[in-house]
Amino acid sequence: MQPTFNRFLAKAGPFLGLVLVIVLFSLPAETRPYFLTFHNFKIILTQTVIVATGALGMTMIIISGGIDLSVGSVIALTSVIGAQLIQRGLPTPLVVAAVIASGGFVGLLNGAAIAGLRMTPFIITLGSLGVARGVAKWMADNQTVNYDSSPINHWMMTANPFSLSLPAGVWITLVLAVLTSWMLRRTVIGRHIFALGSNESTARLCGIATTRLKLLIYVGAGCFFGLAGLFQLSRLRQGDPTVAIGLELDIIAAVIIGGASLNGGVGGILGSMIGALIMSVLRNGSQQMGWPTYFQEIIIGLVIVGAVFLDRWRQNRQAFSSPS
Amino acid sequence: MSPPSIQLRLQGVRKSFGATRALADVSLEIGVGEVHALIGENGAGKSTLMKILSGAHQADAGTMELSGQPYRPEDPQDARRKGVAMIYQELNLALHLSVMENILLGAESARAGVIDRAASRSRARAALEQLGHGGLPLDRPAGSFTIAEQQVIEIARALLTAPKVMIMDEPTSSLTQADTEKLFAVIRRLRAQGVSVIYISHFLEECERIADRFTVLKDGETVGGGPMAGTSLDRIAALMTGRAVEDLYALPAHSLGAVVLAARGLVRAPRLKRASFELRAGEIFGLAGLIGAGRTDLLRALFGLDELEAGAVEIVGAPAGRATPERRWGQGIGFLSENRKEEGLMLNQSLADNLTLAKLPAFARWGWIDRTRQLATTRQWIERLRVKCRDASQPIGELSGGNQQKVALARLLEHPARIFLLDEPTRGIDVGSKAQIYGLIGELAAAGKSVVVVSSYLPELLGLCDTIGVVCRGELAVVRPRSAWTEADIMRCATGSS
């Protein structure tokens, strides 16, 4: 009985958490009239896009047993690159491709150091966090990068804010989530990513090219981060090198709340998406309650600690160990 | 060309690592469908030989033939492809992945990168059926199974490459008697299917039961071998150690004194249900029982590593009070964990640091550690226990298991403890070191100290202990002097069938 209950908890847990948070915020008088409207729902979804897209890449990394602290900086960097390319008049499809590729390139550098030089992901990405942010500020000359207009600006909104349609960004993220989830569950590469996180030496013993796989994971995730940078660009309508500071924590928290473990081997896209939604609902609800931003930060911080604590507790209950 | 009934033949295999000669001259012959025991002390060259066979190392000289063809694997993948599969002592499973995924890891059934679920299931099921375990649920995570079942999963994975030779390294070191029997059934099935099995084990009784032939390695050389039937274990042990087999358990005479420790009604969930016993000065007290019966829990609770839920402990007549390891050290009780790699030792630290850990303030003046004294004391113990090492500042992780265990014991001796709680003190170490540790325990008893030994090796308990208590499903009920026990009796009590 117990193992199945454990797995049920792992799967349903994040969803129950989401329901709980929504219920909590729909009760108070300040929020009740507005919180549960479709319009607010639309806003929450739109606000989730950036973290959710980042979480798609981060989920792969965390399942494989790694981590990437540089996401926020990469988002800032890629949004600056995007803005500058638009400034230079590059056609939109090229801008999109170039921005995603630049995210992938940073992933390549991270992955090469981690897989090739065998250095810990925490340290390497801590370094690239600083480097990417610095390069972003350098490229933007410490200012925001502005441009006249671009179709990209319309990705995060609909023509009529009160209509029943959802912005393109939401749909793109949804489709990518479905594809990524399918990839992780049904393809050989997906299962190898889990194997890598669960037991790297076993994976290597079974002939899996672990170095190449790690590289692939960081590059792939980097592409997702680049896309998140595009969404960030679309929302702000300018390239801002100081944006998304600390966003990596939201993204990592989303993935952990969603059921992944920092030790690797466990995790899923659906859970991460719910985790990202929980973070958005928290922020949205706090805003509507009129709480100051520092209060939001405290709450988010507590939720992150709670999520990691939950992760440990879940791991202990699952304890894959032998009796003595 | 070898006759077709020989599956694997090695001749004159040599391997050196720099100045160290690991294999001097090894010859081996294994027939088709033969279970062959490879026996030798730690450091005899077994693991080097296995690494060469499985492709992790290349031999410097010598020839290897597999099914009559020259055999020279370039790497482990190559070896597997050519038909040599290796099951390591430390199991290689991705615990979060399902049984099916583990079996097929690296050899998945896929179309254009997408996993073919139907084909995967049938391949995995077929492999398990070959081992007589066709009913194992394919979708549960591998980590939710027992060690014995996990072993079956790994053997199933090895079967996918249709191996001619399967090497098993110490496969039973973490298994119960029942699981060992099941493993033997699996090995017999493999044998019937024409697979040769190289069985590496310290347990000579097991080798005697399962192997058809054996080879003994000592100091990198083949020193003996032949059919298992009709060969006495004493002769094999003599070949291993290179000296005539004295009685391993010959202990100095000692007598039992007053009661130094009394435990009444100890309880700790989930495994320890009720334990009571008395320990006298100069007594060697053995705790027998199946794995999981609760013996380790008993020792840990006595020592204060886990909290007791009920029961009382008296030390020399006085209540022992709340148990913490710190207090227990102070009361003269020392504990040796069965898990020396994870609990007993700091593998990166030096011998000296490990040895003096429980008594560090005694080596310090006003908080500063006197390194010279630390090293000197360690060197004394190194000499006394004949620990094979470079020097006292060598990281202890570099020593062999037996020598690590000696240092771990020395920590208790240095402290000095009066009551020793030893959990599987000789597990996984070579015969030579075992003999030394037995001698040490004997000396302790002769000096009036008390020793509690948890062991799953019945001959050891019967040879070493004055008194033996059997723990069955968390209850320590039957305690008798050694003379009142036979192996069969102990097993019956341990399995609760008497």
Image (spheres, coloured by chain):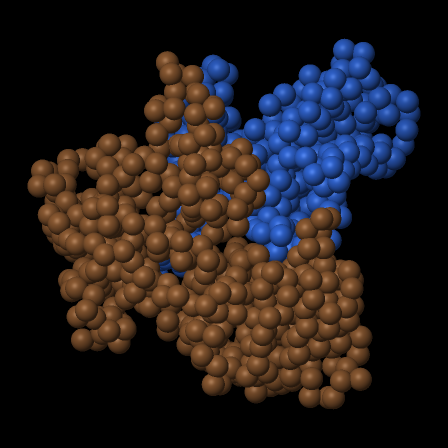
Q: Position of residue B155 (x, y in %)?
A: 57, 70
Answer left or right for B317 relative to B160. Answer: left
Q: How many marks?
A: 0
Residue B112 visible to the viewer: no
Answer left or right for A181 relative to B16. Answer: left
User: Which residue is nearer to you in this view: B359 or B179?
Assistant: B359
Q: Position of residue B452 (x, y in %)?
A: 25, 52
Instruction: Residue at the far top: name it.
Output: A142
Q: Position of residue B102 (x, y in %)?
A: 58, 63
Relative height, residue B61 to residue B374 (above, below): below
The part of the image, by quadrant, that contains residue B146 is: bottom left
Residue B45 visible to the viewer: yes
**At 52% from the left edge and 61% from the top edge, which residue is drawn?**
B41
User: Which residue is nearer to you in this view: B482 or B129?
Assistant: B482
**At 46% from the left edge and 68% from the top edge, which residue is drawn?**
B244
**At 71% from the left edge and 26% from the top edge, which residue is drawn?**
A128
The quarter in which the C terminus of chain A is drawn is: bottom left
The quarter in which the N terminus of chain A is drawn is: bottom left
Q: Position of residue B46 (x, y in %)?
A: 60, 63
User: Which residue is nearer to you in this view: A185 or A276?
Assistant: A185
- Chain shaded brown: B
The part of the image, by quadrant, that contains residue B57 is: bottom right
Answer left or right for A211 relative to B471. Answer: right
The part of the image, by quadrant, that contains residue B104 is: bottom right
**At 27% from the left edge and 47% from the top edge, which residue is drawn?**
B444
Q: Colour of chain A?
A: blue
Relative height, residue B396 to residue B213 (above, below): above
